[in-house]
Image (spheres, grey):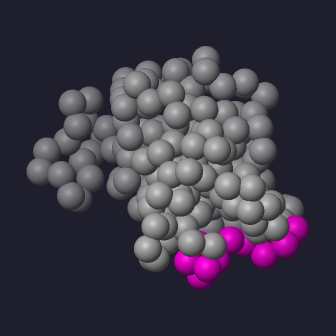
Amino acid sequence: MIKVSEVIVVEGRYDKNTLSQIVDATIIETGGFSIFSDPEKLELLRKIAERRGLIVMTDSDGAGFVIRNYLKGAIDPKYIKHAYIPDIEGKERRKSAPSGEGKLGVEGMSRQVILDALTRTGATMGDNVPKKSGEPICKADMFALGLSGGEGSRERRLRLTKKLGLPQKLSPNALMDVLNVLYTKQELREVLEAL
């Protein structure tokens, strides 16, 4: 797997699954068009963009460009890179019929096509990825800090996400990914002590 420093934004879970088998990166789904009615997720993407940079990788169909253009207008362009996949006709294996435009989406792209798209966009990859100071926040930390797996952990997560201005709907794993982008383990401890 190739490390990518920037956070990659994709449309849905199948795109995320495909990318997570190719790159070691934080990958966030827009939920398709639901990004238009989710100001919390948009604000999260802005924060992450300022901290680590974003790579937007949407399908090459009309819907993908609508989502891409929305993000392009809503987030400062200096924090965004755009990875474009080629127009390839076909259908993904899990689908019974091709999409309306008959093109493969991100989930249907080969490993090499995805890596080429990331390279063309100027993604910080491989040996160029800067080392993050400190240890990453892991599942054991989430449990030890009372954010998952224990009594009251859901309420504690909700208080934390509210204090940090993050989406309330983040699962424990999604919250861990976001926290690893925005905070060190020590910074997280300090925030939790203040709760």
Residue displayed at 78% across by 28% down: 78
From this viewpoint, which residue is outermost toward the top?
Answer: 73
Q: Quadrant of residue 178?
A: bottom right
- Point out residue 67 in the picture as x, y percentages from the top left corner: 46, 27
Question: Is 80 placed left or right of 37 in the picture?
Answer: right
Residue displayed at 46% across by 76% down: 150
Is 136 inside the magenta-drawn segment?
A: yes
Q: In which quarter of the image is the C terminus?
A: bottom right
Q: Nearer the viewer, residue 28 or 193?
A: 193
Residue displayed at 35% across by 55% down: 14
Q: Which of 152 and 105 is in front in this view?
A: 152
From this viewpoint, which residue is outermost toward the left?
Answer: 96
- Point out residue 156 in the picture as x, y percentages from the top left corner: 53, 60
Question: Is 69 placed left or right of 131 in the picture?
Answer: left
- Point out residue 23 in the picture as x, y percentages from the top left corner: 59, 64
Q: In which quarter of the image is residue 180?
A: bottom right
22 w.r.t. 54: above or below? below
Q: Which of 150 and 128 is in front in this view?
A: 150
Q: Is residue 8 visible?
A: no
Q: Quadrant of the N terminus?
A: bottom right
- Point out residue 186 in the picture as x, y percentages from the top left corner: 81, 67
Which residues make up the magenta segment?
A: 133-144
74 w.r.t. 98: above or below? above
Residue displayed at 74% across by 62% down: 193
Q: Nearer the viewer, residue 187 or 118?
A: 187
Total tally of numbered discs in the picture: 0
Q: Is residue 70 visible?
A: yes
Is 108 inside the magenta-drawn segment?
A: no
